[in-house]
Image (cartoon, rainbow, N blue to C red):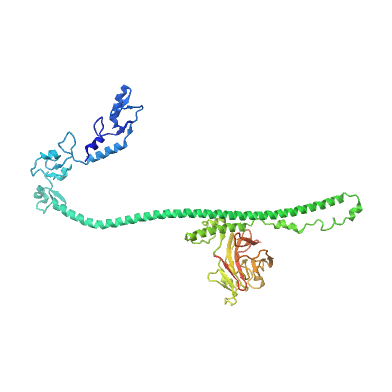
Amino acid sequence: MASAEQRYEVTCSICVEVYIDPVTLTCGHSFCRGCIEKVLETQKRFGAHTCPECRMRIQEPVILEKDDELYKKVEDLLSTLSNQVFCTYCINAPVPAAKTCMLCDASLCDNHLRVHSSSVEHVLIEPNTSIDKMKCPIHRKVLEFYCCDQALCVSCTLTGHHMGHQAETLLQASEKKIEKLRNILDKLNPKRDGVEKEVQSLQKHKRDVQEKTSGIAEKVSTLITNIKKQLEDLEQRVLGEISRQEEQVSLQVWDLIQQLEIKKEEMSRKMGHIEELCTMTDTLAILHERESDRIDYCEADNDDNNVHALRGLDLGLILLTLHTGLADIVTGTMRKNKVTITSDTNPDTTTNPIQSLNVYMDTDIFLDVNTASNDVTISSDLKTVSRTDVKQCRPDGHMRFESPQVLSLKHFTSRRHYWKVKTSKSANWMVGMAYISIDKKGDQSWLGSNAKSWGLERWKGQYSAMHNSNDIQLPQSPSCNKLWIYLDYEAGLLSFYEQGLPARHLHTFTAAFTEPLHVLLCVGTNSWVRIAR
């Protein structure tokens, strides 16, 4: 019910009615837009505008701002008034009704209810604007009975279609209906409780997800920061390796330049001496000069080949350092954060960011038992070859080695690849690559003893590079039992490195490969070699 105070708050002081499109002046007083516009139009003749409420002078131009708060109050009041029932007989002002008379079709306030007839015909109900709905449309009498889903008056039960029916009073019918509704309510209550539990469960799940999201986001930020730090360290390591190689090559070039400068001065001295002889007039002196016309006087020294033997940057070592560093970061990150991925060993994949370097780390290299000699054993995972004194009973065949060697199942025909091997620390062994067409029997079958294989040998604590029966003693002494093997098939490069920080280059073979290359392992007494996973 709208109070007098509420009505006063939304009443325009000009028209004394509820505001229509209320606006506010700069002084703070509000009026209907139409009312204040008429007042301001009238005030034009006096050359000044003032507020009708407080008489405060209003500066030009006059700004009428819509009062949103007051507009909302007017809407609330009108909504309240539209739902109220007012006294039919109070014509000066709307007064809320206390009762509605079914016979008079009128609503009455408390004052008019005192003088209203109290006879039985005048049935009083709660204030209602829909009296017609409570009367029989045929007999215009109050609906009191209920039959066949239809409300009836007394006359309807005595005549017409419902004559003789066992009609119930509206109260009885409503009680039965209420009982049915309560039964339905009893069934709906547990269902609603179940839905409420589901809602609560979903809300809890939402909160859990929000909490986990916050935690995961924090972990990801920390992880990314850690990866950035590792990448920066790797960048410094790779750049340091490049700088080290550049400095090494520069020193070699500088030494060669110094040697060539000395050689150049010696040649200039010889040329000057010869030119001096050519200008002499003393024929006997010319003929007595024996050194300048010797056969070896102008022949180049063997050091001329040093320029051609000079190597550039070791791209394989640079790529391996970068590639293994990235692989270690990815592997370490996944292991630390318990991330599981499916290994994709297909070299054609483009989804692996590390493989975008065009260097492929091969972890799917397995040994071919059909090529293993009877002097070696192969592990169950086909990764390790070991020398044994117990002869294995493998059937002989044209693919089986007579010497203690074994080839890999996988072969390489393109691109850059690298893999890791681990060896016994003190025994003798050989690791390398060979064509499948290598001899399997006789002295020519050993790794490095033919033109179809290239290998690194450890023999009596020293490294040797072997190819086509050429044994090149390497200056480096073994310092660990872990090696990298790097292959650039198209460039014809096969390199061997000791693992470490930094990695140490041992030897690089250069060749024009014409057949698919297989890994070839050879083991001596009490030795073993394992291809790393």
Residue 312 in the image, given as x and y percentages of width and height: 66, 55
Question: In which image quadrant can residue 42 be found?
Answer: top left
Furthest residue toward left = 119
Above or below 397: residue 110: above
Image quadrant occupied by the C terminus: bottom right
Give the left or right position of residue 22, taking residue 308 as reference: left
Q: Is residue 15 left or right of residue 148?
A: right
> Vertical placement of 254 versus 372: above or below?
above
80 over 311 or under it: above or below: above
Q: Residue 302, can we see it?
A: yes
* Image coordinates for residue 409, horizontal then vertical, percent: 56, 67
Which residue is nearer to you in this view: 287 or 240? 240
Q: Nearer the viewer, residue 47 or 78?
A: 47
The answer to whether residue 146 is seen in the rendering is no
Viewer-proximal residue among 470 and 113: 113
Q: Is residue 523 above or below residue 279?
A: below
